[in-house]
Amino acid sequence: MTEARTLTKRAATGALTGLALGDALGFPTEFNSVPSILAKCGPWRQMRLPKPAYVTDDTQMTLAVARGLRTAMDRGLLTGPRLLRPLREEFVDWYHSPDNNRAPGHTCMTACRLLDGDRPWQEASRTGSKGCGANMRVAPVGLVPGLSEEQRSGAAQLQAALTHGHPTALAASDLTARAVHLLANGTEPMGLLGQLRSYAYENSGRYLHRWLGDLWRHAGDPTPEAYITRGWEECLAALATVQDALRDPSPETDPCERTGDGWIAEEALATALHCFLLFPGEPVTALRRAACTRGDSDSLGCLTGAFAGAYQGADAWPEEWAGRIEYRGDLLSLGALWDV
């Protein structure tokens, strides 16, 4: 990818729009088997965006993370304490919103209810949960320009930990933000998995005290390093499944059969990467592949769309689709804030 293309493609708008489109495309197919999806929608390569193009809690919570980031950075240098308050407020607002009626996950609902008060956030976090709700909403962290690696990693892990405190949820969110960041800034798909695996190896055992506080104690691990290492090891194993699947690619086979159904964080990351890397130059086809799966199709579509949009930019998506996605105004205003 040329430098000129990287600077003009509007990666943030592309990623946020793609995320919402994948979410909307997968919304009607979640909990369905592939044969039932094909019976309802026809050939998967011809799947159409629903009318109206409603999204799920995945996009709603992505917007909450994005607004929390914007508020925190308006107040100064991004740090854990500075990000915590607006994120917590956004999550609680989402919990109480009348629009929170899109089959939200149990973990998110429980944790956000507990965040509504004065208790330390670590006590609200569900440390036994590594559901995909941790990383389906993290893309904005990868799109904000100018962050240091520690800020990006810390913000990604903190937004996950507020609800999903299992270390694998934190590591998968960190890797998801890293992938979005790399693709937005010109990394070619062919080299993406290698860079993510190197990043995971380098960060295994590194606990971000300034962002996570004493979360590790609530999970029952003997040390913070032991806690976070568990997460990185599971994510490395998940990335290895993607690498194995792509050695012998099978675009017509449900990707969940090779890399997991996506209900948990590391599988959501792996299968979304699988879908994107099967069709790196065909963003709409990648979304359709993610939506026609037996697994958590809206979250898989959401993450696949974030990867494809970060790589291809805003022009990746047909205007007929992008022009009618729910929350389009919010997606465009936040994208414009971070487009470079």
Image (cartoon, helix red, strand yellow):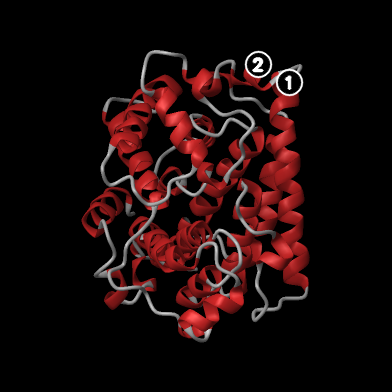
Q: Name the side, left or right, on which 87 lies relative to 225.
A: left
For the residue marked with disc 2, what is the amino acid? Arg
Q: Name the side, left or right, on which 269 lies relative to 282.
A: right
Residue that badge 2 annotates: 217
For the residue marked with disc 1, what is the amino acid? Asp
Q: Quadrant of residue 225?
A: top right
Rendered position, 2 above or below 115: below
Q: Position of residue 93 (x, y in %)?
A: 29, 33
| Residue at (25, 59) in percent of width and height | 328
| Residue at (42, 68) in percent of width and height | 25
Disc assigned to residue 221: 1
Q: Position of residue 252 (x, y in %)?
A: 65, 81
Q: Name the side, left or right, on which 234 lies relative to 330.
A: right
Asked if one can make out residue 80 in the rendered structure from this viewpoint, the answer is: yes
**Do the residues bearing badges 1 and 2 touch, measured as CB atoms within 8 Å?**
yes
Q: Quadrant of residue 31?
A: bottom right
Q: CA distance from mark 1 to mark 2?
A: 6 Å
Q: Quadrant of residue 220?
A: top right
Asked if one can make out residue 3 in the rendered structure from this viewpoint, the answer is: no
Nearest the viewer among 191 and 237 is 237
Q: Position of residue 121 (x, y in %)?
A: 47, 20
Q: Name the side, left or right, on which 283 lies relative to 129.
A: left
| Residue at (28, 75) in percent of width and height | 319
Q: Position of residue 158 (x, y in %)?
A: 50, 30
